[in-house]
Amino acid sequence: MIEIKNISHSLGGKKILENVNLTVNEGSVLGLVGINGAGKSTLLRIASGVYIPEEGEVLYDGASVFLESTRREIFFLPDDPYYTLHTTGKNIFEMYRVFYPDMKKADFAKYLAIYGIDEKKPIRNFSKGMRRQLFIALALAVKPKYLLLDEAFDGLDPLSRLTFKKAINEFVEENGATVIISSHSLRELEDFCDCYALIDKQTVASSGDIADEVNKLCKFQIAFTEDKTEDIFAGLPTVKIEKNGRFFRVILEGDSEEMAEKLNLLSPAVIDEMPVDFEELFISEVEHRGYTK
Amino acid sequence: MTTFKAYLAYRLKRTGITTLIFSLLSVIFTIFTVSVSTKSFAIPYNGETGIYILAIILGVFSTLIPMLETADFKNRRNLDTLYFLPMNRFKLALAHYISGFIQVAVIYTVSFAAAGLYLINYSHHFRLEYLPLYYGLSLIIGLVMYSFVMFIFGQANTVADGVIFCVLWSFVLYYSLGFFSETIGEYFNIFWTDAHNVVYNIPIISELYGIYCDISECYEWGIVYMPINNLTMIFQYIIEVREEYFVRSVEKLISQSYMFWVWLGIGIASAYGYFKTFLTKKTEKAGEVSDSVFGYVSLIPFFGFGLLLGTSYGNVFCIIVFAMMVSGYLIYHRGAKFKKSDIILLAVALVLPLFGTILNAITGTSLEHSEVLAIILFFGTPIASGVSSGMNIYLLLKNIKERKEGKKRKLNKNILGIIISSAVLIISVVAMTVSSVLAILN
């Protein structure tokens, strides 16, 4: 279990995180979401021990992140990992094996083969996506108990994303690992994260089980015979309203059956319930907080 | 094998080829210098060892290797991949410290061995039995230089700032120690490079490079910039069998050996500073403006005022020094963002030469540096303490206001600052008045 307790941290004199508390249960895959500059990367760096927080602590199974024994079970993959002009995949593997002696060359080679990456070629010649794949292969070969991934899908093409998601799912199933993964690709996160945490205004604004949170919302497509304005939904717990001609797409808070009954009272010509996804949940959250309209 | 040992072995393996190349280059330079020197000046002496090249090699690599060894820690991306690894920061710092010094020691030892093997052919000319003592002493001082560069380079947040700090601090250390040495009456201390050597050899060096272009002479002059210049010179006297100097040189080596402990003190303090900085420095500062007190904050005023003191007031050089100070702050802040303290220091730097010019005009004579220093202290102390009092009073009033507005919970300790600076102001004004009255009466 990962426990992030009362974390506060500033960068360049500006408060980035204020009293952040978050618990990630054993075997969970947590999606860390938030708008650009919200502090997701800073939180991951603190969680991995790269940054020393000004206040608070991070515990893994009750032990501090700064203990060597704890760190042996953690692997952090930053959004832009470092490499020199002549670094190859082989060099990277050799360096990390110093710190993770149980790491197996065969595992690394297996993951590289999935992505079709040559470990002997200099990393500088790789595309951003290929570099990402190489480091993901490294992270998975380490077989950490706790895997922290920053902007995990950045630079990956749709096929690689699919392969990556499959690899993570298998990795979690086989090793019982706990994963925190930050990304802006919410549709991708929804596929394999079981819980989420939204970082907003320097703290965890909301968190929980993705399915539970999504079920708190319902979405309908409604059409009227006459032209109506958005005011028709006044008094309903709307989160988002989109108008397209005589059609409306409405996201509401509450039980879907109850909301459908209320909407039927407006005498629509057509009413269809639609599924709500994680991205809509995120957008409705941030819009609700006044970021976009 | 523990992670620490494994990482140290990995570092040594990774730097192996670089060390090999540096060692080969050093051996080539050593053999060339030693072979040229032993065949020169055959009469009236028996020849020269040319071991000054070893001092240059030690000086160069004790400066270069720490920078190469820790440059990666100035890169935030690299820190992301290093600081989460299962090895605590002290061990990480120690691994890089040991790995770097092993590289320096290997390069120096290989060069030393090459020089020694060559000189064995001339063993009847030289007292080669003193070579091991020179090797031991110089290597320890090399470790001190290495630790000092490790500490200073560690103060910077970027590689460029680190190089600037190391260059400037090497002058600060050797100037200060040279002046200290001269102050206590030792104009030639075997453990320091004399300050005047550094200053007076600048035009000679440029002349040598410009006119003679004799490579052996060129880097022979390079040794005056090395902190072990005088130590090497003494050992040259001892080893090169110059009977008239031999006894005096050995006596000097023994009588001034106490200064060796000062070197060791600097080394221990530097090593402590290096580890302390490594453990406490914020990771997120990598690549940012270098705001350490051992950086631009202290170096710009030191060099500004140091150069002003070292020149005649009224000279156009003062304007150049002032422009250098301004440029220094522009580099430091990455733009024209001057703080109050910078403006005060620049104002003082501007006022001092003007003041000196006026005094020169009144007295009609050129002032000695010591007189200038005395005048600056005489007038500078009340000015500085007055400014300090004013600033402290301003900050105190500001704090009181903020406290009333609920922005601050407790008052800063400005009252103590006001008391101290006011006391200094009163004492200096009284001293100034008394001495002026006495001067008039006389």
Image: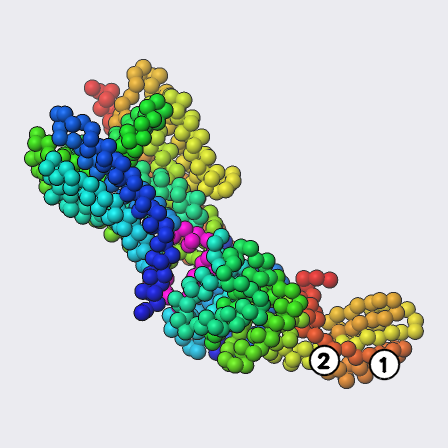
Residue located beneath label 2 in the image: A254
Badge 1 density bin: few <14, some 14–19, many ≥20, Cα 10 Å: few
User: Where is residue A166, by image quadrant?
Assistant: bottom right
Please state if A193 lies on the left or on the right of A53 as rendered: right
Q: How is the image coloured?
A: rainbow
B58 shown above or below B100? above
Amino acid type at circle 2 is: Gly
Q: Along the line of sight, which residue is nearer the eye, A148 or B417?
A: A148
- Say the numbered circle drawn on residue A265: 1
Q: Along the line of sight, which residue is nearer the eye, B364 or A74?
A: A74
Q: Earlier in the sequence, mark 1 or mark 2?
A: 2
Q: Which quadrant of the figure contains the C terminus of chain B?
A: top left
- Residue in view at x 66 percent, y 67 percent: A158
Q: Secondary structure at mark 1?
A: loop
Q: Secondary structure at mark 2?
A: loop
- The answer to whether residue B198 is seen in the rendering is no
Q: Position of residue B377 (x, y in %)?
A: 29, 32
Q: Position of residue A204 (x, y in %)?
A: 57, 69
- Residue in view at x 25 percent, y 48 percent: B110
Please state if A222 lies on the left or on the right of B59 as rendered: right
Dot 2: chain letter: A
- Residue in view at x 57 percent, y 74 percent: A167
Residue range in magenta is B69-93
**Circle 1/circle 2 CB separation < 8 Å:** no
Task: Estimate the spatial distance between the alpha carbons at disc 1 and disc 2, rounded to whole Å.
Answer: 16 Å
Amino acid type at circle 1 is: Leu
Dot 1: chain letter: A
Q: Position of residue A285 (x, y in %)?
A: 67, 69
Q: Residue furthest front?
A: B121
Q: Along the line of sight, which residue is nearer the eye, B353 or B414?
A: B353
Q: Do badges 1 and 2 share one subunit?
A: yes
> Is B371 within the magenta?
no
